[in-house]
Image (cartoon, rainbow, N blue to C red):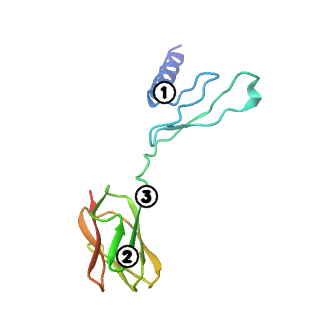
Amino acid sequence: MGEVIRTVSRVAILLGALAAAGVLVRCGQEPAASGPAPGSTTAAPSTPEHGAGHSSSTTEVSTTPAGPTGRTINITVSGGQVTGETGRVEVPLGTPVTVTVTSDVADEIHVHGYDLTTDVPAGGSSSVNFTATIPGVFEVELEGAHLQLFELQVG
């Protein structure tokens, strides 16, 4: 009898956690459009094989926290003018970052502090991909032209 009580208590705790995360669905209701909290739980779609008028959902619990989503920063250089995400661009520490530069002149993209470079052809584009693992503020520039594209703030 004691084992049954412990099992029921565990189920109640799990159901409480799922309800707090907003992923429990009552029969006939659709899950909220916003979805579960990052890294918490996900609800599988209903299946018709459980009878007309009723839906069931399978809940899968994940204990792996969700990592930060990637950030793409797009810059265009034309006639010496920089457009796109200029100024200071903030990203959280640990974020995968892609810097894509389209330029009318051939040059080198340089991410200072990370010491990353890549060539960009005239009339083309090129990208630098990295994970923002060093906190601080770093200049991103066209190296040959000494043209600052933006400042990357990691933290």
Proximity of marks 2 and 1: CB atoms separated by less than 8 Å: no
- Rendered residue at 32%/63% (across/down): 133
Q: x, y (%) of residue 107?
A: 37, 85
Secondary structure beneath label 2: strand
The kind of residue tagged 3 is Gly
The kind of residue tagged 1 is Leu
Q: x, y (%) of residue 131?
A: 38, 64
Q: Is residue 84 left or right of residue 8?
A: left
Given residues 89 and 1, the one toward you in this image is 89
Count residues near mark 1 (Cα–Cα under 10 Å), then give few for <14, some for 14-19, many for 20+. Answer: few
Could you tell me how far apart the alpha carbons at marks 2 and 3 are, in whole angstroms?
23 Å
Proximity of marks 2 and 3: CB atoms separated by less than 8 Å: no
Could you tell me how far apart the alpha carbons at marks 2 and 1 are, in whole angstroms?
54 Å
Secondary structure beneath label 3: loop
The numbered mark at residue 151 is none
Residue with the mark numbered 3: 70
Count residues near mark 2 (Cα–Cα under 10 Å), then give few for <14, some for 14-19, many for 20+. Answer: some
- Which quadrant holds residue 143? bottom left
Q: x, y (%) of residue 63?
A: 46, 42
Q: Is residue 154 left or right of residue 106?
A: left
Q: Is residue 1 above or below residue 7?
A: above
Residue with the mark numbered 2: 77
Question: Which is more foreground, mark 2 or mark 1?
Answer: 2
- Rendered residue at 52%/31% (across/down): 23
Residue with the mark numbered 1: 14
Name the image quarter holding the C terminus: bottom left
